[in-house]
Image (cartoon, grey):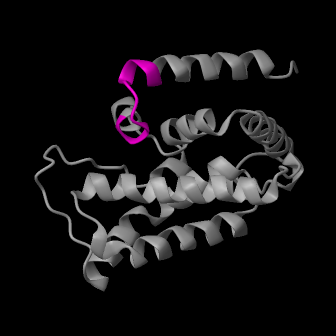
Amino acid sequence: MSQAKRLIPAVTFSKSSEDSFRLDTADEFSLLYNRQHLAIYRFIYGLLGTSSAEAEDLTAETFERAWQARRRFRGNESAAVGWLFTIARRLVIDTYRRQRIRRPSDEIEIENLLDANGTPEEQAFTRQQQQTLWTLLQSLPIEHREMIVLRYMLDWRVMDIARQLKMTENNVSVTLRRILARLRREWPEP
């Protein structure tokens, strides 16, 4: 398992929709923040593919909006996680609408994702591969990028992605296979 995946807590969806998950107090909200802030950050970063500072700002804004609306929230912890990802996704879409143009892919900060181990040649090759991947991801529609980020950056199960995106599991699986096939076709030859 890569170091990046160990840093991300697995999303746990409770089995029962009866469980109450309250966000009325700062302590309760803080618990949700502590469990999910890194996943929300990586989700936003994966969708935007821009600077880490912009992803941090949108992560903060996601939790600020959730804090402001916390008393209206009803549901279990699974619903709270989905609610946060929905807020984050809407903020990303709003950001695209405001910018109207995407930044060049060379502005993507991938240094945080690289492993410091290895020779300089291996690190340069890894950096080039990462840059190629980010460029290809940015060419995908946001809905497809969202699936890739949830599945491969956040390690969500297909069932959880389907629930979050209000799709069938089969539709998510088929779409993921098609996205991966497209990425393989578009991957440049060495």
- In this rendering, would 68 be left or right of 26? right
Say whether residue 111 is visible. Answer: no
Q: Is residue 15 above or below residue 112?
A: above
Q: Residue furthest bottom?
A: 26
Left or right side of 108 for 44: left
Q: Which residues are magenta?
A: 163-172
Using residue 76 as the reference point, say whether residue 100 is left or right of it.
Answer: right
Residue 69: give x, y in percent of width and height.
38, 73
> Residue 189 falls in which quadrant of the image?
top right
Q: Residue at x 61, y 67 (%)?
A: 58
Residue 18 image point, x, y percent: 10, 52
Give yes or no for residue 65 being in the magenta stretch.
no
The residue lying at 62 percent from left, 21 percent from top is 180
Hey, which quadrant is residue 144 in on the image? top right
User: Which SS does the magenta portion mostly show?
Assistant: helix
In the foreground, 133 or 68 = 68
Q: Is residue 170 magenta?
A: yes
Q: Position of residue 179 (x, y in %)?
A: 62, 22
Occupied quadrant, residue 27: bottom left
Count of labels in the image:
0
Q: Residue at x 43, y 38 (%)?
A: 165
| Residue 77 visible in rendering | yes
- On screen, 33 above or below 44? below
